[in-house]
Image (cartoon, rainbow, N blue to C red):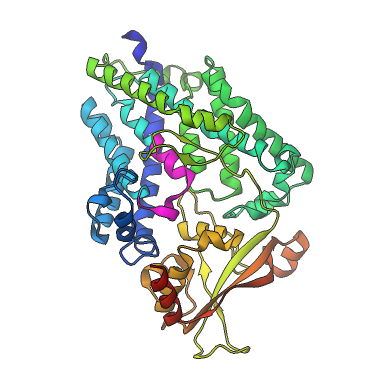
Amino acid sequence: MEWFTADGYWLSRLVFQRALAAVYLVAFLGAALQFRALIGERGMLPVPRYVARVPFRAAPSLFQLHYSDRFFAGCAWAGCAVSAALLAGVDGLLPLGAAMALWLVPWVLYQSVVNVGQTWYAFGWESLLLEVGFLAVFLAGDDVGPPVLVLFLLRWVLFRVEFGAGLIKMRGDACWRRLTCLYFHHETQPMPGPLSWFFHRLPGPLHRVEAAANHVTQLAVPFLLFTPQPVATGAACLMVVTQLWLVLSGNFSWLNWLTVVLALSAVDFRLFLGDAANPPTHLAAAPLWYEVLVIAVTVALLGLSHRPARNMLSRRQVMNTSFDPLHLVNTYGAFGSVSRVRQEVVIEGTADDTPRRDSEWREYEFKGKPGDPRHWPRQFAPYHLRLDWLMWFAGLSPAYARAWFGPLVERLLEGDRDTLRLLRRCPFPDRPPRYVRARLYRYRYTTWRELRATGACWERTYVREFLPPTRLDAVRGREQERG
């Protein structure tokens, strides 16, 4: 079938595949380095306890069949190795079927991680990576042109990411309709970056321009993805620019980068590179089995799309939700409401046998979460600091931390090495503290004058106690009652 492939998009496919492999590599690296403290056998939310109560059909995963920390580590590092191989272009050296099988490996492995990751993996970009990774399996190897249907499905994902995010904003917080949300967002976002202070200090009218441009990019531009070239390329490039602006202004894991990757799949590079972007002459006709498979998958995914589409158009729209256990077609969105005030949970410990008013309380410092007001935020995205993100949610409401905060305190009191590796600095390098407490502070960015005078980018004010001074035996007793 001559219509089946779009040979002119061979470079778009190549760029998309290599960039997606890089995102996979970052995701698997984060899983390998963080899992023991989060979901390991002695983690805060252990996988064995989870799979004992959740059936396979609800959360398909290799770890439903067998779990050990060694097995998980092997799968995570295997995912890193396969991702690195795909990044290097090994799939281009393989026949079509073998290339598809190689792309299937990281999808199966990461699906297995997400489906047992619980709260630590309950982010929209996990489902987005799985949905996009599944489509990548059917983009074929270098010897066949990219299928039109898969390119269309990638644009359908990008449309839902952008349009869904735009709708959730317009239906949610009124500040989006008044164009004032960015008066607060750069200060209250989950994990600020090194430039977030400067973005927050932009003039108010420019913040309104930011919000208006966001609405245009998310509510109008996505429809242009389905128009002829060069309009579709122009729409994709606008999305890339918007996402790079978000990359500069905060740390949103790989969400922005994966959206950029999706947008690049819609770009016709011949518009920029001319003959240099023409397809190679060795592209062969797609075999019949491959055409039948791609058509069947397309029909199935379009059938599964009806629930995300209905949700997107519903007045009760929910964001970042999967409607099937394999995360094949999902709904997306972010910041339907914007916090006006930033509250952070600060964890401290003391070596005193009995806490007193004059006890020395030393603060645990996180890698990305605001803590010491003089510590300037660093850039971590696309790497995902999962504990830091959940600490932001804990500052919004203790309910977000109910399942894992007690185990976190327990491991700090034990001096657990895997947990301490997730932190920037442990104030008790020789022996664990006798007591740990948590206090809630309100954080705000300093002004230009305050920054020059103190060198601190944050100013914080004590709000209330989050957790009273707690000993190891007390927190263990509470966890035993819950477990």
Q: Residue 24: percent from the left, percent from the top? A: 37, 43
Q: Residue at x 70, y 61 (%)?
A: 444
Residue 368 visible in the picture: no
Q: Residue at x 29, y 20 (%)?
A: 144
Residue 65 against residue 219 in the figure, above or below: below
User: Foreground: 170 or 20?
Assistant: 170
Q: Residue at x 53, y 33 (%)?
A: 311
Quadrant containing the N terminus is top left
In the image, the segment drawn in magenta is: 116-131
Furthest residue toward front: 481
Q: Which residue is drawn at 39% across and 48% down?
A: 27
Query: Would you say 399 lies left or right of 282 here?
Result: right
Query: Would you say 362 lies left or right of 111 here?
Result: right
Q: Residue 454: percent from the left, percent from the top? A: 71, 69
Residue 333 against residue 114 in the figure, above or below: above
In the image, is residue 126 part of the stretch drawn in magenta?
Answer: yes
Query: Would you say 381 lies left or right of 328 here?
Result: right
Q: Residue 112: percent from the left, percent from the top? A: 31, 47
Query: Would you say 176 lies left or right of 217 here?
Result: right
User: Foreground: 385 or 283?
Assistant: 385
Q: Residue 129: percent from the left, percent from the top? A: 41, 40
